[in-house]
Image: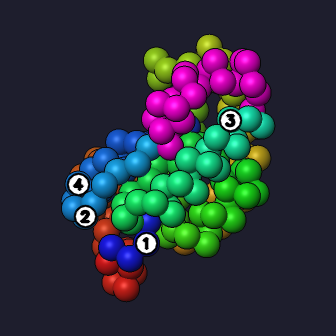
Amino acid sequence: MRRHIALNGFMGAGKTTIGKKLANRLGVRFFDLDALIMAEHGPIDIIFDRLGKAAFRNFELTALQKTVEDEQPGVIALGGGAVTHPPTLDVVKAKTFSVWLYLSLEDTIKRVRSAKRVRPLLGANPKNSKIIGLYTGRVSVYRQSDLIVEAGGKTSAKLVTAIIEQLPKELL
């Protein structure tokens, strides 16, 4: 592969699950920015509580820069809000081929509300209005992706195949 593939999308879109399977199918490494941050700085909710959102976004930027500069091209799962940080979006645009795992707002609400994981920006039992506000605020940035793939209603295997079929041949 000639460039990293960066998966982005809202919480619950399947970036980590799909990213692992996509990397496996392509025979490349998988990088999860959240996992990289946690390995170096600790749990994400504690980072948000103690240092704030701005510090977390800077940790995301650093982890992404290090990955794209030091590692062979692979598949990167970005955090749901990573591309809302302009310096991170700049790196994504310049150094990766980005794929938005698009979920409808309705599917997003269902997935986020049914997840056992508490999201720092939403808290436990998030209200629909809070999810809707974050989602609608991010859509315009997600739309800047190189490829948009509908992630709802597909098995992970079919979604991975759909992504691979739409990747530019010169990327592979």
| Residue occupying image coordinates x 69% and y 65% | 90
Which residue does the numbered mark 4 point to in the structure image? Answer: 24
**Earlier residue among tags 3 and 1:** 1
Q: Secondary structure at mark 4?
A: helix
Q: Position of residue 44 (x, y in %)?
A: 59, 26
Of circles 3 and 2, which is in front? 3
* Residue 129 makes an appearance in the image: no
> Horizontally, is 82 left or right of 52 in the view?
left
Lateral position of residue 138 relative to residue 73, left or right: right
* Mark with earlier residue (1, 4): 1
Above-or-below relation of 102 to 34? below
Considering only vertical position in the picture, is 27 above or below 78? below
Is residue 161 a member of the stretch shown in magenta? no
Q: Earlier in the sequence, mark 1 or mark 2?
A: 1
Q: Amino acid at mark 4?
A: Asn
The mark nearer the N terminus, 3 or 4, is: 4
> What residue do we see at 70% from left, 24% from top?
48
Tell me the crowding category of disc 3: few under 14, some 14 to 19, or many 20 or more residues within 10 angstroms, Cα based. some
State the residue position of label 2.
26
Residue annotated with mark 1 = 3
Circles 3 and 4: CB distance less than 8 Å?
no
Q: Earlier in the sequence, mark 3 or mark 2?
A: 2
Q: Secondary structure at mark 2?
A: helix
Q: Which quadrant would the C terminus be assigned to in this image?
A: bottom left
Q: Position of residue 170 (x, y in %)?
A: 37, 85
The reply to whether callout 1 and callout 2 are in contact (CB within 8 Å) is no
Q: What amino acid is labelled 3 in the image? A: Phe
Residues in magenta, as a range: 33-53
Which residue corresponds to mark 3?
A: 56
Q: Mostly what secondary structure, the magenta segment?
A: helix
For discs 1 and 4, the disc positioned in front in the rendered view: 1
Element carrying mark 3: helix
